[in-house]
Image: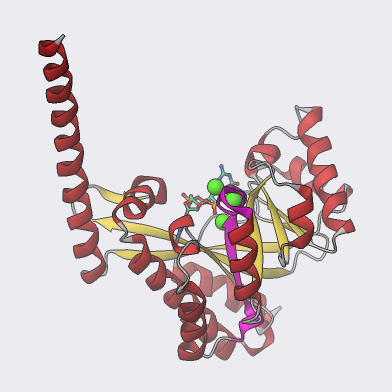
Amino acid sequence: AKESGRNKIRVFSKKMLERVLKMSRLEHELQAARKNNQFFLVYQPIFETGTEKLSGMEALCRWQHPKHGLLYPKEFIPIAEESGDIIDLGLWVLREACSTMAAWHKNFPELSELIISVNISAVQFRMASLVDQVSTILEETQLQPDKLNLEITESTIMENAESALFMLKRLKTLGIRLSIDDFGTGYSSLSYLRQFPVTSLKVDKSFTADMLEEENSLEIIKAMLALANAMKLEVIVEGVEQSHQLKELERIQCKYVQGFHLARPLSLEKAEDLLAKTHTC
Ligand code: C2E
Ligand code: CA
Ligand code: CA
Ligand code: CA
């Protein structure tokens, strides 16, 4: 028993060591990557149904890695969250997204109502300093506060609804917009939902994916629309990949949509091409 106990400890330690080594390697790369400007943002349009008006852009982070090529958030955000690097990276994303939108408002005066959406990690959301950081960035970039939308996932919020409520209320005092992202996957308590000072719900793309095949998914989307209507919240349905999905969403009076069928996440250059086109028509 003594022997196997010792073996267990050795196996555990070896795994731990490997994990720590891998983490520290990636963590080290993350820090260097920030300094070497390997991160960049892409922008996915959000449209109003019916009018087909461009209403906003969601900033999404990418890592151009010198060896591994283009990396997507699922490959580096969890590591950055575990190492704490997400704090710096998240601040960079926020500053970059806000200053880009402020510049767009200047260069395309007719599009001054465009909103920039930024994803906030659970780790950032737990830091009391987030409110001051957002406030500072709004001042630095001169972006109108009501043109910034922060997206926080439902599961992040429901992890600790009481402290989330406190944080959301503090963020709201800045005059910004707040979205519950991946809505429908995180078991919101309706009594809390009523109290959250949020502007909109983003229906998770898993419901959109099978809404035409699964009667249940369509019914859930309809229920979320009804719920949002009753609470005077806006709804954005994400993950719209097919024209038939868009048609059905228009039929059930969903107001905002996002997805590959409408537009993929765009490079800065492509995003500005779209703005220039929107601007002149
Ligand atoms: P999310 O916030 O739910 O963003 C939507 C994701 O779905 C994006 O993936 C987007 O490219 C993708 N998408 C958009 N339209 C469609 C569609 O029609 N079909 C499908 N299948 N997918 C679509 P991406 O860029 O890989 O980001 C994945 C997740 O990583 C995001 O999910 C968000 O949670 C996180 N993320 C991205 N950028 C940031 C960031 O700057 N900070 C933080 N904290 N998280 C980020
Ligand atoms: Ca999002
Ligand atoms: Ca989402
Ligand atoms: Ca997601």
Judge whether residue 273 is colored magenta: no
- Say whether residue 146 is visible: yes
Judge whether residue 147 is colored magenta: yes
User: Going by the image, does 203 lie left or right of 125?
Assistant: right
Q: Which residues are magenta?
A: 144-161
* Residue 158 drawn above or below residue 89: above
- Say whether residue 248 is visible: no
User: Going by the image, does 122 lie left or right of 231?
Assistant: left
Q: Position of residue 200 (x, y in %)?
A: 72, 62
The one nearer the camera, 2 or 124, is 2
* Residue in the image at 47% along x and 86% along y: 136
Q: Position of residue 40 (x, y in %)?
A: 37, 66
Residue most extreme to the top: 1
For the N terminus, which image quadrant? top left
* Residue 274 drawn above or below residue 62: below
* Residue 106 drawn above or below residue 114: below
The one nearer the camera, 105 or 13, is 13
User: Going by the image, does 53 lie left or right of 112?
Assistant: right
* Residue 77 drawn above or below residue 43: above
Q: Position of residue 129 (x, y in %)?
A: 45, 74
